[in-house]
Image: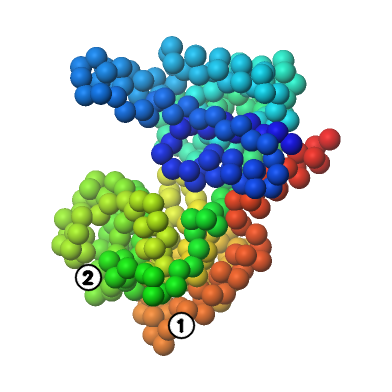
Amino acid sequence: MKVLVLEEGVASDIYGGAFSKAFKSIGCEVIHHKWSIFNKSYPNNCLFRLLGFYKKFESKYAFGFYIRHLNENIKQLAKSTKPDLIFIYRGLHIFPSTVRYLTNDLGLVVYGYNNDDPFSNNYPAYYWRHFFKSLPYYSHVFSYRDKNISDYKSIGIDSSLLRSYYIKDRNYPIESSSLSCKFMSDISFIGHFEHDDRDKLLLSLLQKGINLKIYGTGWHLSPVYKELVNFLGYEIGPLRGDDYNIALNSCKIALVILSRLNNDTYTRRCFEIPASKTMMLAKYTSDLGSLFDSGKEAVFFSSEEDLADKINFYLNYNRYISIGEAGYERLCRDGHEVTDRCRHIINFYYNMF
């Protein structure tokens, strides 16, 4: 089976790149195309700086010369390669006319997938305009979260669930002898900053004397950033490469705070944490409760006070160890690796006909 994977050229390989590798691993012929031209670095002179600024402007608002060129390239690539399936990961820059050409004119099967919530009120109106206008032309649209299935249905679009995943080459247990003292902690939170009081929650844990480490992007925007740094003793920044998995393995408990921006009821980290055999501690949602058995395979909290109490309880007598082990076993048993998602997509494709 020949699969054409199209994606925006983001820096990480956990998105379309992960699907491409996984499709290959299960025997598909894969063409992977990403429009990374918008993230390209240019020499430091006035002309190239202006060019780079213009491309970023086009990328943000999804219109202009390069966007039109991108869409023409996609049409020509699909026409010349004749894939059995096109899988589009976040088609923000793809015109409705392009998707219509792929499905109606070329007769190809085109699936859409998107990890963000296009129905969230927290995005500007222009952001999803091409995506929404393209929906009637997709062969099928997969939803990252249950909520979006009903959202799509409300506008007349059929959708089905395709959850996030972990990647076995990036998320796995590490022997304690191979870990770095740099990342050792009782609790870690790895995630971006949002204006949802997560900073105040984490600050309260630090003020209680809990051994916590924080990593992620955008934390300098927090009103209590200086206080957080004073407790932590370092500037908060993202983890690169293998450091992310090492940090997850180096803590006893990993905390999950769900994004309000995307109305999340679970997130990718809910699979990546158990993949490291680290105990996951998250605010309860019915979605998470369906994925992991509370108190046995993961632990859920309901309030700030409950969070602190559960941290202390599970740290005592090493209770977190058995939770991490059971969470890992449940993860493997239920099949939440990216290749499992690709098998689901292929099975869905064959069931269409």
Against 184, residue 132 (above or below) is: above
Q: Residues within 10 Å of mark 2 (few under 14, many from 20)?
A: few
Q: Quadrant of the C terminus?
A: top right
In the rendered structure, which disc, 1 or 2, sits on the residue that comes first in sequence?
A: 2
Q: Nearer the viewer, mark 1 or mark 2?
A: 1
Q: Position of residue 94 (x, y in %)?
A: 54, 23
Residue 163 shown left or right of residue 107 in the figure:
left
Q: Quadrant of the N terminus?
A: top right
Extreme residue toward the top, this view:
65
Instruction: Assign a secondary structure to mark 2.
Output: helix
Q: Which mark is residue 308?
A: none
Instruction: Assign a secondary structure to mark 1.
Output: helix
Against 315, residue 74 (above or below) is: above
Q: Along the line of sight, which residue is nearer the eye, 219 or 105?
A: 105
- Amino acid type of the residue that numbered disc 2 sits on in the rendered structure: Gln
Confirm or deny contact between disc 1 and disc 2 (CB under 8 A): no
Q: At x 29% / y 24%, what residue is drawn? A: 42
Mark-to-mark CA distance, 1 and 2: 23 Å
Give the residue number, with chain letter if any, for mark 1. Answer: 319
Q: Along the line of sight, which residue is nearer the eye, 100 or 74?
A: 74
Q: At x 41% / y 87%, what residue is drawn? A: 317
Q: Along the line of sight, which residue is nearer the eye, 68 or 307?
A: 68
Looking at the image, can residue 156 be seen?
no
Q: Along the line of sight, which residue is nearer the eye, 18 or 298?
A: 18
Q: Position of residue 143 (x, y in %)?
A: 61, 42
Extreme residue toward the bottom, this view:
317
Q: At x 52% / y 80%, what residue is drawn? A: 322
Q: How many marks?
A: 2
Q: At x 42% / y 84%, what residue is drawn? A: 318
- Amino acid type of the residue that numbered disc 1 sits on in the rendered structure: Arg
Q: Position of residue 83 (x, y in %)?
A: 70, 28
Give the residue number, with chain letter if any, for mark 2. Answer: 207
